[in-house]
């Protein structure tokens, strides 16, 4: 496997992780709970997303 292929896979996995976090926030999980489960500091988790995106996801219902 080439270095470029590995980088692309890593980027894809990171995108999937972010989508899953947004989905869990939308379902009512708290940012601190998710950070703890991922063994991350809550500030690091917050910096993974553009400002306000986690709050926006929190305000949406699953069917919106």
Image (cartoon, rainbow, N blue to C red):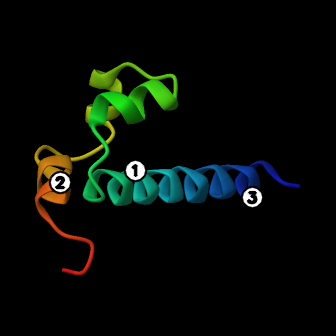
Asked which secondary structure carries label 3, the reply is helix
Name the residue beneath numbered marker 2.
58
Binning the other alpha carbons within 10 Å of mark 2 as few (below 14), some (14 to 19) or many (20 upward) gives: many
In depth, the one of 37 and 9 nearer the eye is 37
Name the front one of labels 3 and 1.
Answer: 1
Vertical arrangement, residue 45 with respect to residue 25, above or below: above
Q: CA distance from mark 1 to mark 2?
A: 11 Å
Q: Residue at x 34, y 25 (%)?
A: 44
Q: Is residue 25 left or right of residue 17?
A: left
Of the 4 image quadrants, the one containing the N terminus is bottom right
Q: Residue furthest right?
A: 1
Vertical arrangement, residue 29 with respect to residue 61, above or below: above
Pointer 3 or 2: first along the chain: 3
Of the 4 image quadrants, the one containing the C terminus is bottom left
Name the residue beneath numbered marker 1.
21
Q: Is residue 39 left or right of residue 54?
A: right
Name the residue beneath numbered marker 3.
5
């Amino acid at each position: 496997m080439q270095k470029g292929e590995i980088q692309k896979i890593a980027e894809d996995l990171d995108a999937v992780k972010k989508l899953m976090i947004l989905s869990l926030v939308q379902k009512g999980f708290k940012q601190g709970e998710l950070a703890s489960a991922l063994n991350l500091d809550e500030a690091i988790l917050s910096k993974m997303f553009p400002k306000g995106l986690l709050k926006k996801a929190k305000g949406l219902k699953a069917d919106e």
